[in-house]
Amino acid sequence: MPEIKELVKSLADKYGRTRESLIPILQGVVQDQRYISDEAMTEIARELDIAAAQVYGTATFYSFLDTTPRGKYVIRVCRTITCSMKGKNQIVQEIEDLLKIKVGETTQNRKFSLLETNCLGWCHKGPAMLINDEVYTELTPEKVREIISEYIKK
Amino acid sequence: MNILKSNPLNEDITMSNTKLKRVDLIFEQDCNTKEVLQSAWAKSKDEIINELLESGLKGRGGAGFPTALKWKFTSEQPETERYIICNADEGEPGTFKDREILFQVPCKVFGGMAVCAKVIGATEGFIYLRGEYRFLLPQLEKKLDDFHKILEELKVPFRIRIIMGSGAYICGEESALFESMEGQRGEPRNKPPYPTIAGFRSKPTVINNVETLVYAFMISKHGARKFKELGTADSRGSKVFSISGDTPIPGIYELELGMTVEQFVEEFGDGDTKAVQVGGASGFCVPRKKFKDTIIGFEGVPTGGSMMIFNSSRSMYNVLKNYIEFFEEESCGQCTPCRVGCQQLLKGIEAVKKGEKHAAYLDQLLKLTESMKITAKCGLGQSVANSFSSIVENFREEMIY
């Protein structure tokens, strides 16, 4: 995987090669690849000169550092209490129907992954979700249909 | 196509004229950073600490440690490499004020950090921003550049960097946050030593909540008196509240401290309020019968500002289950009381609800939370007992089949 090797190298050039650079590098890999593959972890370990187990340990701790393949657009629907009270289940249902996947799954074409996440910090405007870094609030099934269809076109 | 994406630029903060006293210290737009910093730099370190001490400001993240003492202890350490860190890992369910503060008045947050840097002699500061708020980053970095230009003009040797989190609630715990900044798993450390002695990179560190830093900045600007005149003896000043749930007017409000839950509900409830969760999932649930006698503040129910309102259409079992699921997933897993405790609490309430366990099993679970309170390593495991016992004891019938 020369591509991963180059990505890791350029991230290490940018963030440095100390232990403190590890999470920024992992975040950079996720931004670019949507997940951190075993190859990427091995490469990071080599670049930073630490054990691969150390990289794995840190990467698997954080819920936004995915270590399983994800789609180009990762949808994270907030499941915490207020969003839940304001109709989160309907939102999830709508997305599941639209994309024909369940929570935790990725579409065949690797375009979308659907996940649930803990409090996004938009409780006054629930239900809320993130698509990659973009936030969408006060969702209704209709709104979700519009948003997702825009992403399908992208 | 009308894509209804939230636009933070149009974020409106509802401010109507009602009974509870509204305060406008935090979001007041006129921050005049340069002047405030100039005057802070003209003062001695002790003058700033005494002003802060006089104000009675306590940490606004929830724990409520006196801010002046944190700064003072750190400044007295023999080690001269010291840091100021802004904790912007706002993960407590029902809290969203820090996002709004960082969006609207980041210059005050930076300013508060710079004033602290003057006191403790730090040259480097960090903002640990939760991954969920990454969309704030481009604007924050731009504002930070402007701020650094002011520091350059004033010849102040202090710079701030933003470090991104990656979706771990536990990293809001200060020592877990340091671990995360150091590239490790976000697992809390043993205390002591406290951050004032050994924090980030094991150096003396002040770590403050976003809102605390803004108040520190405003106290530096207006003096202690304006702040001290507000609130009560135990809870000085005002506080930014994040209000959500069954309310016609959800949003962010800066209110004077010292009100009762009853006063709060009269203003923000929908007329049918059954309970208010004060302080998020790790806080306390106040049932209707206790509204009148419960003060929101350090003398009653302390809060980092999370106020979730539930009306009588809500099942408190579902509320509790949502909280315990939250804790079970966010527990870092390093200490057994918290890791296994959260799993067992979840299984336990499900079993009681399904009728697989007798209702008396709830008392066993309450005992378990008591054990977690004294044996868990950090605040996460210790505070599960707060919401668990306050919901189970006050809404026991709802927990049973």
Image: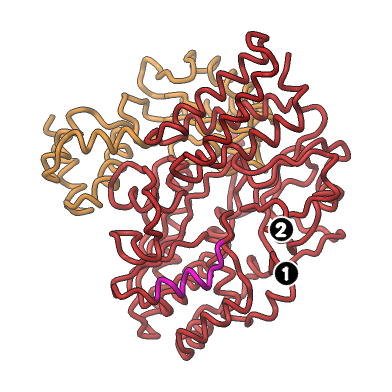
Depth check: A139 or B318 in front? Answer: B318
Left or right of B192, for residue B391: right
Q: Residue furthest bottom?
A: B42
Image coords of residue B254 (percent x, y) = 70, 61
Q: Which residue is mark 1?
A: B233
Q: Nearer the viewer, residue B287 or A41?
A: B287
The kind of residue on which mark 1 rests is: Ala
Earlier-in-chain disc, 1 versus 2: 1
**Which tint is chain A?**
orange
Residue at horizontal 64%, vertical 33%?
B388
The secondary structure making up most of the magenta span is helix
Q: How far across and how far down the image is residue B123, in percent?
A: 33, 74
- Crowd tier of the residue under label 1, counting other residues whose Cα lies within 10 Å: few below 14, some 14–19, many 20 or above: few
Residue B35: x and y in percent read: 52, 85
Q: Is residue B97 left or right of residue B83?
A: right
Question: Residue, x 64% and y 80% (percent of image)?
Answer: B224
Q: Residue at x 64, y 37 (%)?
A: B387
> Residue at image x 70%, y 47%?
B243
Cα gap from disc 1 to disc 2, whole angstroms: 9 Å
In this figure, what is the number of numbered marks?
2
Q: Chain of mark 1?
A: B
Residue B226, horizontal then vertical, whole percent: 70, 78
> Which tint is chain B?
red
Residue type for callout 2: Glu
Q: Are marks 1 and 2 in contact (CB under 8 Å)?
A: yes
Q: Nearer the viewer, residue B6 or B316?
A: B316
Q: Which residue is mark 2?
A: B299
Q: Is residue B160 above or below residue B280?
A: below
Residue B149: numbered disc: none
Magenta residues span B65-75
